[in-house]
Amino acid sequence: MAKNKWFGTDGVRGVANVFPMNADFAFRLAAAAAQLICTKEKKVAIARDTRVSGDMLEAALSAGFMSAGVDIVSLGVVPTPAVTALASGLGVDMALMITASHNPYQDNGIKLIAADGNKFSDEMTARLEALIEQNSFVFDAEKIGCRSCSDEVLNRYKQIALSTAKGGKPLQGLKIVLDCANGCFSEIMPQLFAELGADVKAIACAPDGYNINRDCGSQHVEKMLAEVRKQNADLGIAVDGDGDRIKVCDEKGELVRSEQLIAFLAQYLEQKGENRGRPVVSTILSNTGLEKFVRGTLGLGYYSTPVGERPVVEKMRETGGAVGGEESGHIVLSDYSRSGDALMVSLVLAEGLKAAGKKMSEIFPLFEFEHLFFENPRLKSREQVKPIALSAEVQALLEECRRDLGETGRAVIHPSGTEPLIRVWVCGSDAARVDEAGSRLLALIEKMRDAQS
């Protein structure tokens, strides 16, 4: 069987009630995980976001685990970062988060979280896939698990969030627009910001199972930007449905790019003495200006990883990095969370803004973005993506472009894992070299695509 047939870097995802995101697959996934992973505590935790299909998938997962003699603790609607942060204290073999993150309600997904709060390796998910595909589970009539419910994780997560702030009302004087995407943060995020003294205007905080991420949240920020201007707010914060992604705007309703937020957080934590010279981690698709700012202005180490939150988190663990993230809006503060955490990031960001005593538009940009060539040539099918992106011709030209750029920039060819696209990304200080490299790579990919028609 091909490795990672169903599992991507962030679990399994698809249209709800359609294989593999249906009850049959969820049952088999649970039975496989019970056999392969749940060998010590014989207990798992399950959480979900607000989409309508969450109950169905939780019921199917629960049936699969309990049929295999594994107990279930249902955590209810809980943000993904709360589960990753607190899984290690639950006395479980693993946790599962039912969510399709920033996708519309029709989709859903299952994220697998190890007992220590980290994600499982590709090797482990490949082994799970093999068991799921065999579908030869044997159940014991004398070994049936039980189900219980707990709000322990959500309550503890709230307390951790409150404890990050110093003083009774540290955010007093800040007016903040919060777009909660009709997702997991709809109730607790406005509540916590208000408790910390902020003047809060919350939008998209009425989940009905169908409106998660609909024209709101981190993927659709237009209403948040307009509300910030209308309210004369100091900043706006938009999250996604499961709370691991964040977008931020200044008081003028202008978006602040994720690389700028990563730079600000690293600078602020260094000034507070919490960073202690620890490196910053981001992906190969982050603007090269970030690396130069981190190394040159902040004097910190910088590491670049493949695309995706998991490689960023793994490199942070390996290097002791305090701040990491990617341009898509996943930002990780390792002293606070084990994954992207929109709440913790926004609290530290608001605290840093208060400490600076300036408007956001006076702070950002912290550094100038270097010139970027970025195109997504669309292919005729997903089957074309990897054969073209990883072909000898494209890889040879990519290496030639990297040599031409030298120390002035970076070139990346990134095959999309979900769409028939190849990302052509070239960034650097020499605009002419960047555009030349990008144009050559784009032309070759389009030529190979058209030759296969």
Image: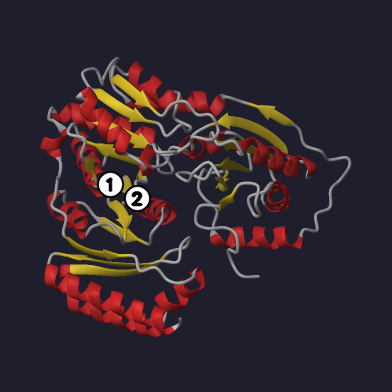
Three-letter code for the amino acid on which mark 1 is drawn:
Ser
Q: Residue drawn at (39%, 36%), measured in percent from left and top? A: 216
Which residue is the extreme one toward the top? 168
Q: Residue drawn at (41%, 29%), measured in percent from left and top? A: 204
Q: Nearer the viewer, residue 369 or 274?
A: 369
Q: Which residue is under mark 2?
A: 328
Graded by Cα atoms within 10 Å as few (under 14), some (14 to 19) or many (20 or more), the crowding at tag 1 reads: many
What percent of the width, then of the height, locates residue 284?
31, 62
Q: Is residue 213 left or right of residue 111?
A: left
Residue contact at pointers 2 and 1, CB within 8 angstroms:
yes
What percent of the width, then of the height, locates residue 330?
37, 46
Q: Which residue is under mark 1?
A: 258
Hey, which quadrant is residue 331 in on the image?
top left
Q: Residue drawn at (14%, 36%), measured in percent from left and top? A: 361
Is the residue 230 above or below the residue 419 in the image?
above
The numbered mark at residue 124 is none
What percent of the width, then of the height, locates residue 362?
10, 36
Render colour scheme: secondary structure
Label 1 sits on a secondary structure element that is helix
